Image (cartoon, rainbow, N blue to C red):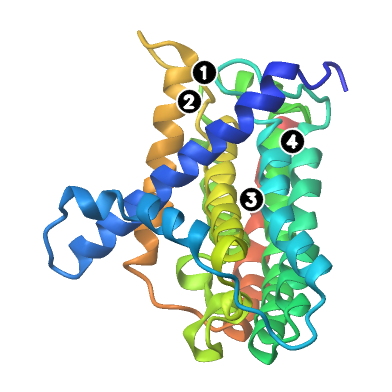
Amino acid sequence: MTDGLALWGAVVLPFGLLLVATTAASLSAALGSAAAGRAVPVRTVLQPVQEAARLLVVRRRRTQHPDALLWRLGGGTLFVTAVLAAAVVPIGDAPVLRSEVGVVWFNAAETLLWAALWLTGWGGNSVAGLIGGYRFLAQALAYELPMMLALITAALGAGSLDVVQVAAAQEDLWFVVWMPVAFVVFLVAALALSFWGPFSQPAGSDAAGGVLAELSGVDRLVVLVGRYAWLAAAAGMSVPLFLGGGAGPLLPSWLWWLAKTLAVLAALVWVRWRWPVVRVDRFEEIAWVVLLPAIVVQALVVSLVVI
């Protein structure tokens, strides 16, 4: 590590990520109303805040013989891992945590999500929750290799695993222009790791809510916040990897990063209301037969250009 985790960053980053996650939830509520052909009043945009307040006072529901410690540890870890992943994302020119292997750090934080969500499904001692947890593990096996190769492709183009250096390497040309497949694969993985939209079967209604089935009150709120936080962290990471980081005219770099992040986040949220849910087994087939070969070819093309 080249720089330590700054004290101000340790305090500000979780609140900033929470704010962006709340924005994503509000946008999702607004798009949901629009997709249903209804008007979007102010109370719809404020619905996530109202729901959060409600969950804070709702009494927790208990199952028989749960492993309460692991259940809550898994749920709380979702948000913690999202904060750890976001720590290496340059907000403008500098991240909270500057690392020479920031790309690997992000991927390592994401792999902790596997254990967190599985524990959330397993700890409640519920059939529906366990099904949801195992569905996510199967889904993770599908998206992980394509996502790793997408991250490696961006790092290869910059010749560095430092996220700041990856963003700086796009001064003349954004990576999304000549790495479009890697960009798309990364966004697909972002949806899958957040079990969002087409890849929300781990929390599917056919399994009574899956990993969310037995969660109530504060426990449910913590998991939902972690879900939106990961969606926000992945959107923020896509900017230095493929969209030039904070580069842009007139405005300060941090404002450009925020604008690009919100644009990507809006696209990810929008997908939820435009694409049907894909079965996990079908997604595995798509990932291994389509996404993986495509990103391998993309990585080879970038290798030849770099050489």
Q: Amino acid at mark 3?
A: Gln
- What x and y, as percent, mark residue 198? 47, 71
| 190 horizontally vs 165: left or right | left
Give the amino acid type for the residue marked by disc 4 in the picture: Leu
Q: CA distance from mark 1 to mark 3?
A: 20 Å
Q: Which residue is mark 1?
A: 172
Query: Which residue is label 2 attached to?
Result: 257
Q: CA distance from mark 2 to mark 4?
A: 22 Å
Earlier sequence position, callout 4 versus callout 1? 4
Q: Which mark is residue 156?
A: 4
Residue 49 is situated, as x and y percent measured from the top left of the image, at 38, 50
Q: CA distance from mark 1 to mark 2?
A: 17 Å
Marks 2 and 3, the one that precedes in the sequence: 2
Q: Nearer the viewer, residue 229 or 35?
A: 229
- In the displayed structure image, the side of residue 100 where residue 153 appears, left or right: left
**Mark 1 vs 2, N-terminal side:** 1
Rendered location of residue 177, percent (x, y)? 48, 37
Q: Earlier in the sequence, mark 2 or mark 4?
A: 4
Q: Vertical placement of 32 versus 283: above or below?
A: above
Q: Residue 298: give its label.
A: 3
Quadrant in the rendering for residue 54: bottom left
User: 186 or 134, which lies in front?
Assistant: 134
* Mark 4 and mark 1: Cα distance apart in space: 16 Å
- The C terminus - image quarter: top right
Q: Give the residue type at disc 1.
A: Asp
Label 4 SS: helix
